[in-house]
């Protein structure tokens, strides 16, 4: 139609492309697309990855893209060695064109490291969450950062539901008691509750936060709350029945249960510290599957000890892999429970791996062919943030 044609002309003038009326992000390929060096930092899969080919996100199974990359004349280096100047990551980075990383075993791409990588043009996060990359430095260097948006959000939302339930129902100590050969119902029941009738809030109401709210609703909570600088659409707010609280301290003081679903950026790093925890309802439960560094590790452990928190669960840590003496491994409430910590795996179920491996390949394919990227996948475009999720700027 004439109006579609006009929209296309306007978009073309802005250097964007239109597809079925949607604006696509600018084409990302800078130059030649043959003979590129692709470096992937993935987690070691060991025996499990040899036995289970669907562990696509492992070093062994390489996202399933080696043959495809090599057939097009690209070089593909895959490693789990990521720390220090002698790591394969830091050594190979020097002449890498495309870097693939995952949040599960993050190759931390700092500003300093970016300086050592003059050829680097594209970072692809196989998963969701690119805080392990210095995004400001990527903007300055015109390195684009893409994620496979949405690839594991259902997996995480389900993990959040499980974590909330296991904390509130005091599941872990109950199971541990059974393994010890004991049976003392009252020791468990004294700290076991129902979700029904509780006030439950999400800090961050994006893709995962919304899925969590949707899944919480049938449990008949007293109220669902959310805190996010981006308000839900009227339609979503009505559908999910969630009330927005604009002041963070007010938000936390009203919740029996809080789930964190915001990215890690300068506005969320260390947000849950001793001061904010002192505004929580005494005995609240906190679930964090977003990023470990949103919470101050020692402050959370201390709040659990004093009873300010009754429980803390999640899969994300401020350093990954977490050191053996990390306080979150062994912290407990005064009854010896309240710890639902696991390694970072909620977003890497086999179902999620299939999706983020396919999504990574699609991003690369579009890049090689000079095609526009799916806008929702672009975190940093050419010299600017394309998402509103990594802080208000
Ligand atoms: P999203 O971009 O759809 O939503 C994020 C929401 O957080 C947005 O609505 C944004 O406005 C909000 N937000 C940002 N800063 C905030 C702040 N200071 N206070 C309150 N709200 C704030 O992202 P999605 O898909 O929901 O993922 C969220 C995060 O979850 C990811 O960035 C990642 O860190 C984490 N994640 C963890 C996984 C795991 O395996 N544990 C897997 C996938 C994601």
Image: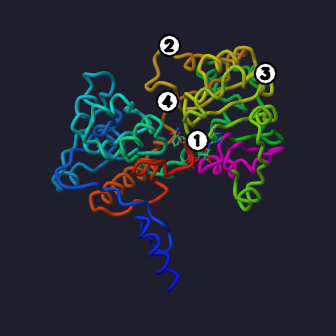
Q: Is mark 1 within 8 Å of ligand 1?
A: yes
The CA span between labels 4 and 2 is 14 Å
Which of the two discs, 2 and 3, sits closer to the camera? Answer: 2
Q: Nearer the viewer, residue 320 or 157?
A: 320
Image mark count: 4
Lower sequence index among marks 4 and 2: 2
Q: Is mark 2 within 8 Å of ligand 1?
A: no
At horizontal 81% and vertical 45% (from top left) the residue drawn is 223
Disc 4 designates what residue? 343
Using residue 333 as the reference point, say whether residue 368 is left or right of it. left
Residue 296 position within the rendered picture, expressed as x and y whole percent measured from the top left:
60, 22
Lower sequence index among marks 2 and 3: 3
Using residue 160 as the reference point, say whether residue 37 is left or right of it. left
Verify CB contact (< 8 Å) between mark 4 and mark 2. Answer: no
Q: Secondary structure at mark 4?
A: loop
The CA span between labels 2 and 3 is 31 Å
The CA span between labels 1 and 2 is 32 Å
Vertical side of 179 occupied by 139: above or below: below
Q: Residue furthest front?
A: 13
Residue 283 position within the rendered picture, expressed as x and y whole percent measured from the top left:
78, 24
Q: Secondary structure at mark 3?
A: helix
Q: Which residues are magenta?
A: 203-230
Disc 3 designates what residue? 186
Q: Nearer the viewer, residue 335 or 120?
A: 120
Disc 2 designates what residue? 325
Which of the two discs, 3 and 4, sits closer to the camera? Answer: 4
The CA span between labels 3 and 4 is 30 Å
Vertical side of 212 occupied by 45: above or below: above
């Amino acid at each position: 139609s004439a109006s579609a044609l006009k929209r296309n002309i306007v978009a073309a003038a802005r250097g964007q492309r239109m597809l079925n009326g949607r604006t696509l992000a600018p084409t990302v390929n800078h130059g030649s697309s043959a003979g590129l060096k692709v470096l992937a930092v993935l987690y070691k899969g060991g025996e499990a990855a040899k036995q289970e080919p669907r562990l696509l996100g492992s070093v062994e199974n390489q996202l399933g893209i080696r043959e495809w990359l090599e057939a097009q004349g690209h070089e593909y280096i895959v490693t789990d060695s990521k720390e220090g100047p002698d790591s394969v990551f830091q050594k190979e980075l020097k002449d890498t064109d495309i870097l693939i990383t995952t949040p599960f075993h993050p190759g931390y791409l700092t500003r300093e490291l970016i300086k050592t990588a003059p050829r680097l043009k594209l970072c692809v996060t196989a998963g969701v969450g690119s805080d392990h990359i210095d995004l400001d430095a990527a903007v300055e260097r015109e390195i684009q950062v893409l994620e496979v948006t949405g690839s594991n959000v259902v997996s995480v939302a389900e993990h959040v539901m499980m974590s909330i339930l296991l904390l509130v129902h005091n599941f872990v100590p109950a199971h541990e008691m059974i393994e010890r050969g004991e049976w003392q119902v009252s020791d468990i029941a004294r700290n076991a509750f129902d979700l029904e009738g509780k006030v439950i809030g999400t800090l961050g109401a994006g893709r995962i936060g919304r899925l969590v709210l949707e899944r919480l609703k049938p449990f008949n909570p007293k109220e669902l709350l959310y805190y996010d600088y981006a308000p839900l659409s009227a339609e979503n707010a009505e559908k999910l029945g969630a009330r927005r609280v604009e002041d963070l301290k007010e938000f936390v003081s009203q919740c029996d249960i809080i789930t964190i679903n915001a990215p890690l950026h300068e506005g969320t790093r260390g947000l849950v510290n001793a001061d904010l925890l002192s505004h929580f309802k005494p005995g609240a439960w906190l679930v964090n599957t977003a990023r470990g560094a949103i919470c101050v590790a020692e402050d959370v452990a201390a709040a659990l000890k004093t009873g300010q928190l009754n429980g803390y669960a999640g899969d994300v840590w401020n350093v990954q892999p977490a050191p053996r003496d990390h306080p979150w491994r062994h912290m407990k409430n005064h009854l010896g429970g309240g710890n639902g910590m696991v390694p970072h795996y909620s977003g890497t179920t086999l179902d999620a791996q299939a999706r983020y491996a396919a999504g990574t390949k699609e991003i690369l394919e579009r890049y090689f062919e000079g095609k526009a990227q799916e806008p929702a996948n672009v975190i940093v475009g050419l010299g600017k943030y394309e998402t509103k999720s990594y802080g208000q700027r």
